[in-house]
Amino acid sequence: MFTTITVIGAGRAGSAIAARLRERGIAVAPDGELRLLCVPDGAIAEVAAAIEPGPWMAHVSGGTPLAALCPHTRRFSVHPLQTLTQTRGPEQLDGAFAAVTADDVDGRARARWLAETLGLIPFALADDQRAAYHAGASIASNFLVTLYRSAAQLFEEAGAPPEALVPLMRRTIENGFELTGPIARGDWETVERHRSAIEGSGLERVYDALAEVTRP
């Protein structure tokens, strides 16, 4: 649908997306038919407003509504549901899902085309549900880092290797997130022993909150 795309922003998302577009034979040029904003969320509205209306406009933010692209009316968004790093290339996009949002049928078709061109699996997301969607994505990705760091702290204090946690976390995902362990068994004596053991670690509130929401 687009033969030329202008990728604005060369961060983690922008660099991976630009590289993938070039792989797929799409010209990444200054005056593309589509201006794809890969800038920080807080800069989207300012950058969009500085571009003369005419070309299609899109952003790759998960939590930013389409209104940030005003005054442009030919607009959509494609959010790669993946954590990206500049130390890797466009292969990071392969097989990941992407939330696509648009105002009309034409915009949705173009958003799906872009997602598929990038190697992503598109699904429709209503614009007014972006905040809840992005919160879910943040819990799954950002808080996973917090969980690992918390568990690694306790392993280090116990003299156990933190890297031993990684296969455990991977297998939990592979097993479809089936809950095991003391809470699943209703073994609250063990939970209390955990609570006593981490006293003074600074992780008490984290453990209590997670235990409460994990309780069947």
Image (spheres, rainbow, N blue to C red):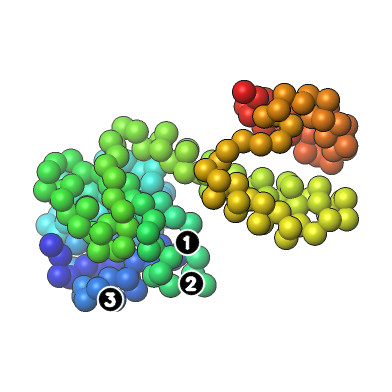
Above-or-below relation of 23 to 151: below
From what the image shows, is residue 20 above or below residue 54? below
**Which quadrant holds residue 198?**
top right
Q: CA distance from mark 3 to mark 2?
A: 16 Å
Residue 49's disc number: none
Tell me how far mark 1 sits from mark 2, CA to CA. 8 Å
Residue 21 image position (x, y, % from top left)? 27, 71
Residue at disc 2, secondary structure: loop
Please tell me whether mark 1 sits on a helix, a strand or a loop.
loop
**Mark 3 Cα-neighbour bin, 10 Å: few <14, some 14–19, many ≥20:** few
Q: Residue at x 73, y 60 (%)?
A: 163
Which kind of residue does numbered mark 2 sit on?
A: Arg
Q: Residues within 10 Å of mark 2 (few under 14, many from 20)?
A: few
Residue beneath label 3, please?
22
Q: Percent position (x, y) of residue 92?
A: 43, 65
- The residue positioned 36% from the left and 43% from the top of the image is 64
Residue at x 67% of width, y 51% of height: 168
Residue 195 percent across, percent down from the top left: 83, 31
Is residue 136 visible in the rendered structure shown here?
yes
Three-letter code, disc 1: Leu
Are the residues at dot 1 and dot 2 in contact (C-beta closer than 8 Å)?
yes
Q: Secondary structure at mark 3?
A: helix
Q: Which residue was labeled with disc 1?
A: 84
Check the picture and name the quadrant holding the N terminus.
Answer: bottom left
Label 3 amino acid?
Arg
**82 horizontally vs 170: left or right:** left
Closer to the chain start, of discs 1 and 3, is 3
> Hey, which quadrant is residue 194 in on the image?
top right
Q: Earlier in the sequence, mark 3 or mark 2?
A: 3
- Please identify the quadrant where the C terminus is shown: top right
**For mark 2, what is the residue?**
88
